[in-house]
Amino acid sequence: MRTFDNAEAGAHRGAGDSGKPQRRGVPSLVPVLLLALVGLLAVLWLPLGVAVRLAALVLLWISPYWTVRDKSLATFVAVVLTAALDVFMYYVDPAGLTPQRIAAGAEILLPALATGWLWRTKR
């Protein structure tokens, strides 16, 4: 049985490798786009909006491009505030079309604001 030195057993770097750790996984644009589309999809068809919201959150939280603070803020604005708005609209059910249009606009605008924040703070 042959033994190797640490230098021989270690991984050798290629000529083009700069020594920086390579980022793997999902590109930063994917969770940002999914979060941007969540509001529109939730207004059009709620089950699709919920599925995309969950996928966007999973991809956001496994992504190395943002700090925990940025991820928490985006999650609060894009998910918690819109869910609170949905619950409020479900139980209060204001009369007239204007409050429902304002709520639908907020449902689209809040995830878009969170998306802008994430894109601005991307590392």
Image (tube, helix red, strand yellow):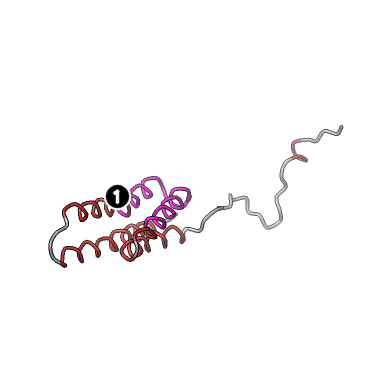
28 within the magenta span: no
Dividing the picture into quarters, in which one does residue 106 lie? bottom left
Q: Report the quarter where the N terminus lies.
A: top right
Mark 1 burial class by Cα count in 10 Å: few <14, some 14-19, many 20+:
few
- The number of numbered discs placed on residues in the rendered structure image is 1
SS class, disc 1: helix
Q: Nearest the camera: 110 or 102?
A: 102
Which residue is most to the left?
A: 95
The residue wearing badge 1 is 80
Q: Is residue 111 left or right of residue 94?
A: right
Q: Quadrant of residue 14?
A: bottom right
Q: Residue shown at 43%/52% (left/top)?
A: 60
Q: Quadrant of residue 112?
A: bottom left
Relative image position of residue 111 (x, y in whole percent) = 32, 59
Residue drawn at x 82%, y 33% as measured from the top left: 3
Residue 4 versus residue 120 in the image, above or below: above
Q: Which residues are magenta?
A: 50-78
- State whether residue 34 is above or below residue 74: below
**Amino acid marked by disc 1:** Val
- The x, y position of residue 7, in whole percent, is 75, 39
Residue 12 location (% of width, % of height):
72, 47
